[in-house]
Image (cartoon, rainbow, N blue to C red):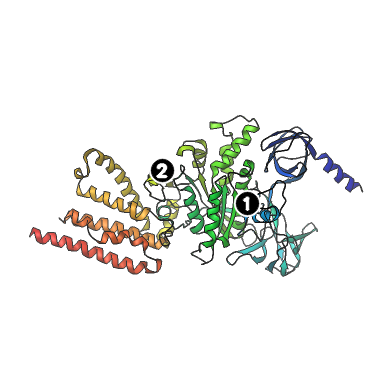
Amino acid sequence: MRTFCSEVNKIIMSQGKVLKVSGPLVVASGMEDANMFDVVHVGEQGLIGEIIEMRGDKASIQVYEETAGIGPGVPVVTTGAPLSVELGPGLIETMYDGIQRPLEAMREVAGANITRGIKVPSLSRTKKWEFVPKVKIGDEVEAGDIIGTVQETIVVEQRIMVPYGVCGKVESIEAGEFTVEEVVCTVRQEDGNLRELTLMQKWPVRKGRPYKEKLVPEMPLITGQRVIDTLFPIAKGGVAAVPGPFGSGKTVVQHQLAKWADAEIVVYIGCGERGNEMTDVLMEFPELKDPNTGESIMKRTVLIANTSDMPVAAREASIYTGITIAEYFRDMGYSVAIMADSTSRWAEALREMSGRLEEMPGEEGYPAYLASRLAQFYERAGRTVSLGKEGRLGALSAIGAVSPPGGDISEPVSQATLRIVKVFWCLDSSLAYKRHFPAINWLQSYSLYVDKLEEWYAENVNKEFPQLRAKTIALLQDESELQEVVQLVGVDGLSHEDRLKLEVAKSIREDYLHQNAFHEVDTYTSLNKQYKMLKLILTFHELAREAVAKGANFNKVLELPVRESIGRFKYIEEKDIDASYDELMEEMKKSISALTAMEGEEDD
């Protein structure tokens, strides 16, 4: 009886009253028993909010739903728990809002428009999943160990792990069909308590999931995008930023990475972006076939949509929701890629809430803690060894789009991001206006993973690949310098060698770096094809330079039909690459040597 009364008193004490409402910010009094980051329910409809500031018994709450109609005196009740996500079977192929409410389930309950106060579980409570045990009665298990599996989709096997903080001996375990709430295993812990395990576990979104060890990234995340894989690669477990002005192709780059990146799981966060962009994702992804499995890309994708017309406070939560789901799959031993589009909209949400809290503003009105919040997000990426006896190897790669106003990357969000990430893909509006896509500027972009990845490329692609990459960058830089000279003296004022550099650099730009995301063959290029394309272009440069040095006619060298064939090599299908490459290489050598011989005869 005493216990029941104390629980009742605790509930009564944890209920406060609204003092003021300022957009998504609600201030409530009588909240002395609440804690920072507790989830609260506001008003009779139980609007979901989160405490972001405590001053005495007053709590400042960011509400993740529209606050119209909420006024002073309205009750506020704390749940005593932080904002958490449900992790278990049912995540893949689902589209969530910023606080992990399934949009499809909400549509079935409330229609096309999201109504306030709607309560829908993140994972279905009625669907049954086939559970296959991997441990037996009497086995010792610890946090992170896999107790069984569920085949969630045709390509993703959900590995059910022992939750953090559980360690002991398996007392019972059952095979069969279960909902996410039904007990599948019981563990007798070292303190004698019996812990019941289900297919689902919860985890607070603002707390990174633990692991045994973080490793140095040593292999690339292959994307099939030539300018990225060849010039500015990202490692598995690495972090990258894609800043660029409006219309420069940030979203298409993100879509391409989500479609083709060498990741077993993709988490795509539409944070504050236009609704029609998420519609494009929903329309495209089910139709696209994964090159590795032949199945729809949706079979390995989790979508989080918090579009620009949704409550601004939920943008802030959407980033954390996405990375927590990504960490969960990483802990299973998967390679995961998370796409955040865009972190600028997330930072704008931080700025709005900071302004309503009357905090001292930093640069351009952003809060002083902007850089540390960005770091907290990106630092949760990495290549790790999971908890548990077997220590699975997993990787979480984070790629964030940044939308600087007017394309000015000197603004705070871009600069704070660049101090954290190791790959910078600078989207250039001038390239976009020229219809050169991906519009990644090869002179301003960089990757700090190149040195660590060179050995992998040499072993797994070709030992020449690192040298070809270095030559390509050198040619593009030389071209930039020569273009300045051309503007002063004209092309005719250059030597044949310099003019040849300009022609080869143009071939690299137009035939290699330019890639059509909507062409069925050119949209994805394997590393083998990338190597052979680059080898053809640079071999032509070497042979042409030698031929011109021996007296071959410069214009005739440039007019050789083989150059057109090299330019069209990117449209050759994967199965025909090797044969076409050998044929083209032979044709190129013959045609250039024939020109050289012809000039030699004329001299005689």
Q: Which residue is mark 2?
A: 429
The x and y percentages for residue 414 are: 50, 40
Quadrant (top left/top right/bottom left/bottom right) for the C terminus: bottom left
**Given contact means CB atoms under 8 Å apart, are the residues at marks 2 and 1 in contact?**
no
Above-or-below relation of 176 to 395: below
Residue nearest the viewer, comparing 286 with 376: 286
Residue nearest the viewer, comparing 373 with 126: 126
- Is 122 left, or right, of 430 in this rendering? right
Residue 339 can be seen in this image: no
Residue at image position (46%, 58%) is 222
The x and y percentages for residue 89 are: 66, 61
The x and y percentages for residue 356 are: 64, 33
Asked which secondary structure carries label 2, the reply is helix
Q: Which three-letter amino acid code belongs to the residue tagged 2? A: Ser
Q: Which mark is residue 168?
A: none
Q: Which residue is mark 1?
A: 324
10 Å neighbourhood of mark 2: few (<14), some, or many (≥20)?
many
Residue at image position (27%, 49%) is 502
Q: Which three-letter amino acid code belongs to the residue tagged 1? A: Thr
In three-dimensional space, the C-alpha distance between marks 2 and 1, rounded to whole angstroms, equals 34 Å
The x and y percentages for residue 541 are: 26, 55
Q: N-terminal of the two: label 2 or label 1?
A: 1
Image-quadrant location for residue 38: top right
Above-or-below relation of 396 to 407: below
